[in-house]
Image: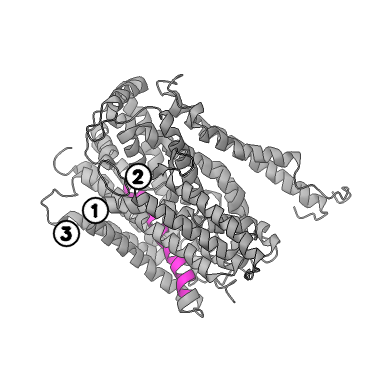
Amino acid sequence: MSQAPEVSRAVVTPMRVVIGLCLVAPFVAMLWVGSYAKTDPAFIGIPFFYWYQMAWVLISTALTMIAYKLWQRDQRARSAAKGGASE
Amino acid sequence: MKDGVNGVALAVFIFFFLAVTVMGFLAARWRKAENEHSLDEWGLGGRSFGTWITWFLLGGDLYTAYTFVAVPAAIYAAGAAGFFAVPYTILVYPLIFTFLPRLWSVSHKHGYVTTSDFVRGRFGSKGLSLAVALTGILATMPYIALQLVGIQAVLDVMGIGGGENTNWFIKDLPLLIAFGVLAAYTYSSGLRAPALIAFVKDTLIYIVIAVAIIYIPIKLGGFDDIFAKAGDAFSQTNPATGAPRGALTPPETGQWTYATLALGSALALFMYPHSITATLSSKSREVIRRNTTILPLYSLMLGLLALLGFMAIAAGIKVQNGQLAIPQLFETMFPDWFAGVAFAAIGIGALVPAAIMSIAAANLFTRNIYKDFIKPDATPEQETKVSKLVSLLVKVGALAFVLTMDKTVAINFQLLGGIWILQTFPALVGGLFTRWFHRWALLAGWAVGMIYGTVAAYGVASPTQKHFGGSSKEIPGIGEIGYIGLTAFVMNIVVTVVLTFVLKAVKAPEGIDETKPEDYTADAGDPGVQVELPPATAGTSH
């Protein structure tokens, strides 16, 4: 990896934008209460308001996991680019 | 409520209680280190916990017995408004993903045990550090008291809380015993005790929730029936307010409240000392990031638990004190032995956070009041001794609080505690990313937030209370009803930013920053991170 070109990496990269979006999305979804303050459609008898928010537990978990994986890749790429084979 | 003592449930409860007591004392020998007389060992479990232990510890710490009782109780009382706990815990994890690893790194590098340690190191200001420490202790005390309220609810339903005319000593004896035992093993084993007990607590809780969420709806005729009955109950007019009791979805006017409560609470959660104590006990930066991806399992459980509030309504549970709704539901629906398991889950669920909270408050006192202001040359042994004693004092204080004062006082203070602790956010999280804020501006912003929050909360009336009747109030300038803590937080930031400009313009002394940019990304194994760890006095040499 040491012959990787010595480019000074930008602070804002596409990957970091994606990471940011993954982390911001739950805030937009959950704070926009008007988008889910209704009872229909119900799921196995549970009103929309409740199952939708519980579904977001899973969605935000998946998004945080993606952010975590991307961040690991980002950090590895950076330390490799620095020439330090610290892995 | 069934009369008399529920013998089978009580026997099961006592069995689990004895089991965790034994574990609590044995925990002292678990992963024992050579140098046990340091605050790193007693107060942070040797900073050695891996992903799973940290997961159990944090889960056991954040999702307290009071949460288990209070969240469904809020749903039982008013419906949708109580469900904000779910978006709140959803938002916590993406949030801490961004700043907690930085706090871990800098704390490991400099041997910080508390958030105040970091604030002092970063801004070179003992005053600001003291403000953060005092806020933390003040916010934690009523939280510990509320854990007792959780145990009391369970004891009451089992029939050993005593009646109105029982002698107070007999009435409170079970609680005194439970807390005496808790105090003893926290004293001897430190953070290792709750870490080990958390395994039992969470396993029990998960089993109880899984059974409850399947078994109770089957007995009640499915979720359709449950929500239909709950909807009927909420549309009844409450004679005290003249308005409907609640709703299945928040009305237009309640949406700001819902969102600001969720956001404000999410911002506040990891300002609490006990959250940070559990975080700093983990052994690497990765453990924390990984935990932000697996901790939401608890949020799912919390959501399911909240639904129990609707089931309590559908099952026709009628209690004056909403806190008793869920224990009562368990006793009515489950066979006696399983009700005992459920009660044990709540009871033990109170012990774990109570232990961690008292350790966290004790660490704050020792590091940021005792060592900074009373005895600067304290050795690690002395620090540990003081911390152990203070952890006892804190618990005795919480006990006195619950036994002598009305329960609503503890609840009011906990509400205030949430508002207060949020005011330490700019110094802590701001400090983790930038040194731009001026220390005096942060202190002034904190003071403004504290004062506004306290005064505003004092002025909220409810049908049953003249003061501290709730946590939301009209937001000045917007006109919507929102969470007071978040309003105070915004004021806090505005004051901090404006004063920072002013203080920089007049060149007020900035204080010495003992941290370096690379400290915030250091991980275990990096040069300096492991080496500088013990003794716990590192980083306080000035």
Disc 2 crowd, CA 10 A, few/some/many (<14, 14-19, 20+)? some
The relative height of residue B509 versus residue A81 in the rendered view (above or below) is: below
The amino acid beneath tag 2 is Gly
Q: Give the image location of residue B135, x and y in percent.
A: 44, 61
Disc 1 crowd, CA 10 A, few/some/many (<14, 14-19, 20+)? few
Which segment did they paint magenta?
Answer: B347-371
Disc 3 and disc 2: Cα gap in Å?
Answer: 32 Å
Q: Secondary structure at mark 3?
A: helix
In the rendered structure, does residue A61 fall within the stretch colored magenta? no
Disc 1 and disc 2: Cα gap in Å?
Answer: 17 Å
Q: Main secondary structure of the magenta part?
A: helix
Q: Which residue is mark 2?
A: B470
Judge left or right: residue B339 versus residue B530.
left
Q: Nearer the viewer, mark 3 or mark 1?
A: 1
Residue sitting at x 30%, y 45%: B461
Q: Earlier in the sequence, mark 3 or mark 2?
A: 3
The relative height of residue B94 versus residue B131 in the rendered view (above or below) is: above
Q: Give the image location of residue B535, x and y in percent.
A: 56, 72
Asked whether residue B373 appears in the rendered view, the answer is: yes
Residue sitting at x 42%, y 45%: B202
The amino acid beneath tag 1 is Asp
In the rendered structure, does residue B349 fall within the stretch colored magenta? yes
